[in-house]
Amino acid sequence: MSALTGPKPVLDVRELTKVYGEGEAIVQALRGVSLLVTQGDYVAIMGSSGSGKSTLMNILGCLDVPSRGQYLLDGVDVSRLNENQLALIRNRRIGFVFQSFNLIPRTSAMANVELPLAYAGVKSAERRRRAMAALDRVGLADRADHQPNQLSGGQQQRVAVARALVTEPALVLADEPTGNLDSRSTDDVLAVFDQLSEAGRTIVLITHEPEVGDRAKRLIKLFDGQISSDVRQDGAPHGGRLEDQQTILMERLR
Amino acid sequence: MSFFEILRFAVGGVTANKLRSALTMLGILIGVGAVILLVAVGNGSAKQITDRIAAMGSSTVTVQSTSRGTTGGITLETAKALKDPVLAPNVKTVSPVINATSSTMTYQGSDHAVPQFIGTYPSYFAASNTPVGSGTAFTDEDLAQGRRLVVIGQTVAETLFPGTNPVGAEVTVSGALFTVIGVLDEKSSSSGFQDANDVVVAPLTAVQQVLTGYGPVNSVIVEATSAAKVTDAQAEVATILDQRLKVTPTTTGNSASSTPYRIQNAAQLLETQTQTASTFTVLLGAVAGISLLVGGIGITNIMLVTVTERTREIGIRKALGAPRRVILTQFLVEATMLSLIGGGLGVAMALIGSQFTIVGVKPVIVPSSIVLALGVSVAIGLFFGSVPASRAAGLRPIDALRYE
């Protein structure tokens, strides 16, 4: 195997469980998920509602914490970090795209994209330049001064993608980014993800739609809080979850 | 992230929803403005009372004869003895007053019963703070000659001389002819049971000759050299009177009930009235306190709603990597701006409002009420603006994002 010079892992999740509620109303959202994502990978996670995919995504994005298990991001154990360090991780390492866009209302597209840079302490002029570049990358440079309610759903989501990209994060996470969009807007947004992937960004996205999942290099299916299949799609699909895990395990050992 | 950047965020947050910000500021404006203005009105009316009392003359002492009948009491001789540069150095003038009650004044067939027909000295006008408006007062020479001259009050002038100038007219009082030489200025009749303008002042000698005869005087108005010397003058007067009237000095200063005279000074009167006024101020203060409370609840409401409404926004900001401290500072600055601008406008409104007369009272701003109203409102605004923001900033981003 040529894994000696293989790309280093960005995401390393081990036996992750997440439990909601207490007593009678207990819900097991994740039942021991282990996952390794290497740099430059493009992973799609699919599953029916209640399969735990959003929960997994929120944990990966450091928006939520797991009940048990370990999560290493770029080799750093996230559970050991305090509130401020987590804020720093969210700001520098992760770009998160939400299903419902989550742009700040009554604030221009430009200001929305600038926001993560502002929290990172980037100077105003530099910030504008980089925000403009990010907007240009998603094809919305001419809409920089528009407020979210003056943009279409697809445009809003592309602004959100630009916001996720602007800090040059190691990892782009997208929670059903096309869930609220029509087919044309879906194509626009996915085209952006394709470009990002070609440029070597690590992407993990959640989707309901098979055609979205087909574009990814690797497709993971979740069922009842566990990974039910894990397939490579770039030409030669991997034989299944167990085999893939073994490959990754060997990569890790080296 | 620099404070300047956070400040820019806060300005953005305030201007993002202009209507909400304007309403928040309006709530604070009304709360602050109402309290300041209400206290100012209370203070203004209290001040009005004090001013009226001060108008009566604050440097005078009134000696009233309490003995009935013609024997005893304060004779004119006794009254004159009160002006003694050695025994009573703080006494400036002494004006004995005799009151020929219920004298009827006639002019060209019309009658007017004057409740107060005062015979006194020229110094009375200054001492009792009743200046002559038109015409002149009588002089010491008029007094010595016993000339029959009168200075009449506004009510008398209006009743007997409607629409004409009374100065120079000849009136009849109990069959004797008097010449009107002046009209007194209008006096506010706030204290007392009778119209302070229904009065006639004539030289003492003339009144004695024509109306009352040479009995004791009713009262003596003693003017002290200054308002600060009133108490000294009162003591001196009491000493002389005790000596003259052969009263054993049981008490110094003010007289016991057995003495044939009673001394009152304006300062004592002022004290009583000031107590009344302060009761009034306390009452208005309570009303102001309640409006401050109500205003505070209004501020609390709008701040809570504003921040709760923005919990989701806080979630987004946290997901983008905003540290808790930055979010807190932003919301604190926003709350400060709204509170201070609203409060400042409230103070401005109260200051403008105090320029007008409200229900007959000229409001007088109490500086401490500005500090109190502004302080309380801003404190409430800050507390209820920052505490919910702090709670929201403490949530996990996902919980804040899911907040409905």
Image (cartoon, coloured by chain):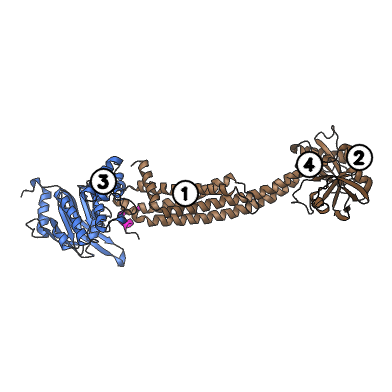
Chain colours: A blue, B brown
In the image, B224 versus B189, the foreground residue is B189
How far separated are the C-alphas under marks 1 and 4?
51 Å
Q: According to the image, label 4 marks what residue?
A: B60
Name the secondary structure under disc 4.
strand
Does residue B399 show up magenta in the picture? yes
| Same-subunit check for callouts 1 and 4 | yes
- Image height of B228 relative to A36, above or below: above
Residue extending furthest toward the top: B86
Q: According to the image, label 2 marks what residue?
A: B77
> Is disc 1 in contact with disc 2, using a CB cutoff of under 8 Å?
no
Depth-wise, is mark 3 or mark 4 nearer the camera? 3
- Image height of A216 relative to B88, above or below: below
How far separated are the C-alphas under marks 4 and 2?
20 Å
Q: According to the image, label 3 marks what residue?
A: A131
How far separated are the C-alphas under marks 2 and 3?
103 Å
Q: Which residues are magenta?
A: B394-404
Name the secondary structure under disc 2.
helix
Name the secondary structure under disc 3.
helix
| Same-subunit check for callouts 1 and 3 | no
Name the secondary structure under disc 1.
helix
How far separated are the C-alphas under marks 1 and 3?
33 Å
The chain letter under disc 3 is A
Q: According to the image, label 1 marks what residue?
A: B339
> Is disc 4 in contact with disc 2, using a CB cutoff of under 8 Å?
no
The amino acid pointed to by label 2 is Glu
